Amino acid sequence: MASRIQIKRSTVPGKVPTTAQIELGELAINTRDGKLYLKRDNGNGTSSVIELGAVRSVAGKTGDVALSKSDIGLGAVDNTSDADKPISSAQEAALNTKVATTRQVATGTGLTGGGTLASDRTLSADIASEAEARAGAAQGKLMSALRTEQHMLANALGWGQSWAQVSRIGNTVYDNSSGRPIMVSYHATSSSQCFLSVAAPGNAWVNAAVARYGVSASAVVPAGWQYRFSYTPSYVVVLSRRHPKHCRTHSLSSGSRRITSGSSWICVSSMNVMRIPQPAKGRISRKNASVSSSWSST
C-alpha cells in the first residue's frame, strides 16, 4: 500500500497555528475552516505563520480575475488631469459669489490707498493740516475733530471768543486785525444818531448799525475790515478771542494818513511822539492837531 503524508491539523473553527507549533516549511491545515497555513522565514531572524490561498474571489469573481473600474465601484473615474477636471455645480455656485480680484476699491475725497483686490489694501485719510484747516480753502482734505476746532477758532464768530468792554472814539478808524470776524455792540444816549460804519480796505464805508436815545446796536466786522463810529458812544463791548492792549489807531483833528514802523506803533502829532510796543505790524491814523486822550486796540 502507498503511504500517506499527514500534516498538522486542527478541527477547531478559527484556530490558527503559532510559530512554536510548526517548523519552517511545515504546513498546517484547519479542516473545519478549510484553510492552509505555512511557517515563513521573514528574512530578518523572525518567522511568521501565513495563510496560503487566502483570497478566494475578487469582486465576486474567481479563477483568473480581470477587473474593470466598475468592478470596484469606480465607474465614474477617468484619467483626466487635475488641470482639466471640471468643477461641480456646487463649487461653481460658491465661486460665483466671490468678488473678482479685478474689482476696484475706489477712494473718495480725502482717502488714499485704493486699487484692485489683487492685493491687500489699506485706506488712509488725508487730514488737513492746521494751516489748511484755519484757511478753510483746501480741497480734497478731511477734517478731524481737532482740525474742525482749529477752523472754528480761526473763522467762526463766537467760537472761543468772549466779550470785553473797550474804549472807542468817534471818527476814529479801527482795524479788525484779529484774523476772524468780531462783533461790536455799543450804546448811545444822545438824541443824535450814532452810526457804526464798516468797510473793507480800499472800499467805501457802509453804515452797519445805528443807536441813539439809549438804544443799543450791534454789527459784525469781518476779519481784515475796518470800523468807526460817527461820534464817541457811551459804552462799547467787542466779542473777540483776544483783546490786545496796544494802540492801533489814533484820532487827530484834521488831515489823516496811516504810518507803520517795524514792530512798534508810532502815533505822531504836532504835540508829541509816542512809541508803544506791538508784536506785529499794523496801521494807525495821524492828523495834524492835538492828540486824543484815549488809546485802544481792536
Image (tube, rainbow, N blue to C red):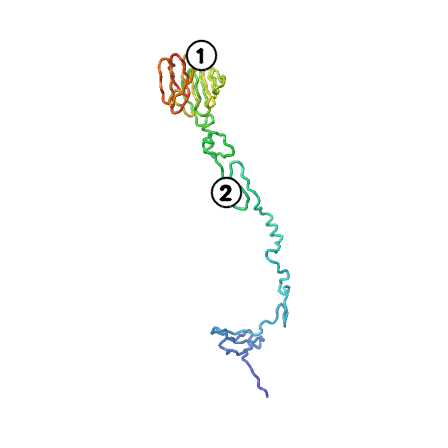
137 lies left or right of 80: left
Percent from the top left, x then y, of residue 281?
40, 23
Percent from the top left, x then y, of residue 52?
56, 74
Q: Give 128 or 169, whichever is nearer the viewer.
A: 128
Percent from the top left, x then y, of residue 14?
55, 73
Q: Is residue 43 above or below residue 73?
A: below
Q: CA distance from mark 2 to mark 1?
A: 68 Å
Residue positioned 51% across, 36% down in the render: 110
Q: Is residue 125 above or below residue 157?
A: below
Q: Choose mark 2 or mark 1, whichever is in front.
A: 2
Q: Residue 245 occupies which quadrant of the picture?
A: top left
Q: Which residue is mark 1?
A: 190
Q: Which residue is mark 2?
A: 122
What is the three-letter code of the residue carrying label 2?
Thr
Residue positioned 49% across, 37% down in the render: 126
What is the three-letter code of the residue carrying label 1?
Ser
Q: Residue furthest top?
A: 191
